[in-house]
Structure formats: C-alpha cells, structure tokens
Image: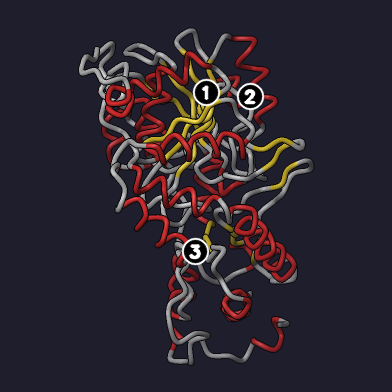
Amino acid sequence: MAVTSLSREMLAIEGGSPVRHTLLPYGHQSIDERDIEAVVEALRSDWLTTGPKVGEFEERFAAWVGARHAVSFSSGTAALHGTAFAAGLKAGDEAITSPLTFVATANCVLYQGATPVFADVSRDTLNLDPERLAACTTPRTRVILPVDYAGHPADLPSILELAEKRGLTVVEDACHALGAEQDGRKIGSRGHMTVFSFHPVKHVTTGEGGMVTTNDSRIAEKLRRFRNHGISSEARQRQAASQWHYEMTLLGFNYRLTDIACALGLAQLERLDANLARRREIAARYTTAFRETEGVIPPVMRSGVNPAWHLYPIRLNLAKLSADRQQVFHALRAENIGVNVHYIPVHMQPYYREQFGYRGGEYPVAEDAYERLISLPMFHGMSDRDVEDVIHAVSKVAAHFAR
C-alpha cells in the first residue's frame, strides 16, 4: 500500500481506528496435533527425562546441521554455559563478544569466573566487526563469541582466521540462526562450537532447550558430562549395562533436556525446512515494502548469506521522522502490532555498569543502532493478512511522522 494513501489516516494512539483489533505478537510458537501426539507418546513411555528421545533428537539435529556431534541442554543459556566450560574459560581469562545481544551471551563468561569483553558491531549487519574484534584481543583472550544477530550469520570466515592465528576458541551464538547458511554451508557445521536455542519463538521449540554442535569428539564428551553433574555415564546407560557404579569426573550441573522436550523437538524438526521457507517469504515481503517507506531502513543481507530470520529488525531514519523510537514504538503498539526491541546493549545494563564501570559511548555503532531499532512480528505461523497488517501499520505510522 502506498504511503500517500495512508497520509490522512489518524493514528490509533491519537483516537483513530487501529489496523488490527487484536495484538499480533512479535514471535509465537506453532504447535499442531503431530507435536501433541509426540509428547503424549513420550509421556506414556518408560522415560520422561534422559531417555532414547534425547539421543535420537541429537543425532537427527547433527545430521540436519551437518555436524559430527550435537549435545542437548535444558536451555540456550545452559548450552552457552557448557561451551564456556568446554572452552576452558577461568578466572583471569577474557572472552570477546558483541554488546548487541541477549545478556546470556556475556553472562556465560561470568559463570566461569572470566571477564566478558565487548567489541563494536558492523554498521550493516550489526554483527561483530572483525577489525574491531582484532583490536580487542589481548594475551588474556581465550574465546571469541560471535552472535548471529537476528539470524544473519556473523563473518565467521574472518573470525575463524583470526582465532587460528591467535590460538583462540570460537563459540558461535547461533540462537537466532538455525537454518541460516553462509557460503553454501549451514550454520553449526564448522567452527569449534555452535549454540542453538529452542525457546518458543525460535524456528524449532522444545518449550525451553538448547543444543551445541561440534566436530570435536573430545569437546562433545566434555559437554555431555558437564550437563550431567560431571558424571561419566547416564542413568539409561547404567540400566542397560545392569550396573549401578558411576564416577563424577568434573564439576558439572544438571542441564539435561528431557525426553518429553526432545519428543516435541523431533516433531518440530520435521517442519524446519517449511518454517524457514515461510520466514524467508515474510522477510522478502517486508523488505520489498519498506524499501519504499520513508524513514524506515530494512535489514541488510550480505552476499553469500541466507539468513534464518529469527527477527526482522528495522532501523528508523530519525532524520526523516518527527518522532523518536519510543514514540514510533508506542504508535505501532496502539495499532496492535506487537513490536519489540532487540537489544538493550549488554554493557548498558545496570549490572554491567556497576561491575565494569561502563558509562555509555564505548560502542557507538551498537548504541546508535539500539536507539533506532524496532523488531517487527516475525514467526512462521503468521498469515498473509498478518504480514499485510504489519506493512500497513508501519507505513501508516511512518507517514504520520514524516518530516
């Protein structure tokens, strides 16, 4: 719909009729009868926690991604913690990550007693800038934690090259990027460790859950022990061997994913290709519309990359609008478009300010992006009408605030 035809529409926040009568959330799970049947079957089985479905889900996930190993965890955060442990992070070490991410990416470094260090992001993708990353490395650096923001892969080839030169471990936070491709390869098939999330708004959900993929057998074994109290065998293995003896070989946690959750994950995995195709279709429709919308900048897609589109984050060109991000945000919410913001930069959170002395201004690209970012609804269960409602509302609000 052309912006000019919307210029006379009164905004809902000022008393006009909203584009929608009910709220369209920014993300939402998609559950069908196949998922319910799979979970019911698991509930009727002999195993509710770590049973056969866990191994089956891990094997099928690894095969889909193209990795040798996949190790499941109770959440994406638990999976990140597992990778920080497996990478050997400890007090006195540093790990470099992006400030534009959910706090769990940096927090997992703190869990190991190490120090998270931030490097600013590239202006186009909002992923770690390899040049700024290189400038941040010190003799204490042990790990690089790139984030595939919104589902667009970070510049992994450059990051891996840097890591190899300096003997660093790369843990890719791909919690947004299941199914994304870079140079013809799926994310999770290369690098030292890659982390995925199965939160309800993701491409595949297990309720809560996470996964780490790796091609290193030793890392995979360390991850399995870490998620199971540091014990070298699991209950199902001991039952099958008719033995009771077990050994705790390291200090781990109870981060196991249940058979119930993995049954749901297996059913969801069957539809992952279709889910990805739908998200990419929605993203293409948005991008076409917003290229013509004054004051709105659609996200960038680099050459050789096929994003997974967990989020669709637009940036506002505030020079062309008479409103700031907060005003636009509230105007869209009044139209019943459930927009969100991803993310408040980690170093601006009160805990990080207090612990590390951040005052703002340290990472200008990430901070500037934050002031202008709005995440539009993006999930594979959206109807064509939902998509058109979002486009209508954004165009309506942009036209109203156009200078």
The furthest residue to the right: 303
Residue in the image at 62% along x and 63% along y: 319
* Circle 3: residue type: Arg
Question: Which quarter of the rendered picture does the C terminus lie within?
Answer: bottom right
| Label 1: which secondary element | strand
Q: Where, by quadrant of the figure, is residue 46 drawn? A: top left
What is the C-alpha distance between the residues marked 2 and 3? 32 Å
Q: Is 112 left, or right, of 306 in this rendering?
A: left
Q: Residues within 10 Å of mark 2 (few under 14, many from 20)?
A: many
Residue that badge 3 annotates: 325
Q: Is residue 109 visible?
A: yes
Q: Are the residues at dot 1 and dot 2 in contact (C-beta closer than 8 Å)? A: yes
Q: Residues within 10 Å of mark 1 (few under 14, many from 20)?
A: many
Residue that badge 1 annotates: 144
Sequence-first tag of 1 and 3: 1
Q: Compared to 21, does 186 lie above or below?
A: above
Sequence-first tag of 2 and 3: 2
Q: Is 93 left, or right, of 59 in this rendering?
A: left
Q: Compared to 382, does 365 lie above or below?
A: above
What is the C-alpha distance between the residues marked 1 and 2? 8 Å
Indicate the position of residue 47 as horizontal and vertical percent values: 30, 42
Q: Nearer the viewer, mark 1 or mark 3?
A: 1
Indicate the position of residue 147 as horizontal and vertical percent values: 54, 37
Camera-side residue: 364 or 72?
Answer: 72
| Label 2: which secondary element | helix
Q: Is residue 359 visible?
A: no
* Circle 2: residue type: Ile
Circle number at residue 159: 2
Q: Residues within 10 Å of mark 3 (few under 14, many from 20)?
A: some
Q: Compared to 81, does 205 lie above or below?
A: below
Residue in the image at 56% along x and 71% along y: 382
Indicate the position of residue 107 as horizontal and vertical percent values: 35, 32
